[in-house]
Image: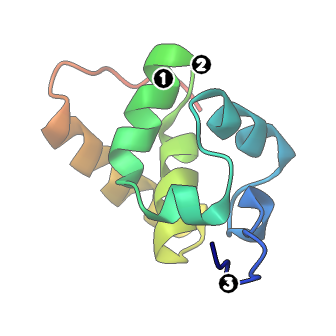
Amino acid sequence: MKTSGKTPGKLTDLPNIGKTTAAKLEKIGIRTKEDFLRRDPYDVFHKLRKKVDPTLCRCALAGIVGAKTGEPWHVITKNTAEEYKKLHPRHKWGPC
């Protein structure tokens, strides 16, 4: 079996993803940059909230979405929170 010889990218190679968030992502089976980029960031955030850390705030959501889109979390926080609310209308945001 041939392999491309390409080493998978680290989660921390993504914008907005540090060691703490990378560790949380690994708990839901996302171990590489490529694993992450194949997924919907809103689904990733929802899974993180349900299975790893129910206290994640809208800033964390923006970090996850921004890791996929390449945008800084602090620029997109309001828009990503509104989009998540459309997907999960019963959700109530706590403090960031």
Marks 2 and 3, how far apart at CA? 33 Å
Marks 2/1: CA–CA distance: 6 Å
Q: Height in image: 46 above or below 17?
A: above
Q: Amino acid at mark 3?
A: Ser
Mark closer to the chain start, 2 or 3: 3
C-alpha distance separating marks 3 and 1: 35 Å
Name the residue tied to disc 1: 49
Quadrant occupied by the N terminus: bottom right
Q: Provide the residue designation for mark 3.
A: 4
Residue found 18% across the figure and 18% down from its top: 90
- Residue 6, picture quadrant: bottom right
Q: Earlier in the sequence, mark 3 or mark 1?
A: 3
Residue at 59% from the left image edge and 44% from the top image edge: 30
Mark 3 against mark 1, which lies toward the viewer? 3
Residue drawn at x 59%, y 32% is: 96
Left or right, 90 with reference to 95: left
| Amino acid carrying mark 2 in the image | Val
For mark 2, give the secondary structure: loop
In the image, 91 versus 43, the foreground residue is 43
Q: Are marks 2 and 1 in contact (CB under 8 Å)?
A: yes
Q: Nearer the viewer, residue 56 or 10?
A: 10
Q: Is residue 39 above or below residue 88?
A: below
The residue lying furthest to the right in this view is 19
> In the displayed structure, would residue 9 be above or below residue 85?
below
Density class for disc 3 (Cα within 10 Å; few <14, some 14-19, many ≥20) is few
Name the secondary structure under disc 3.
Answer: loop
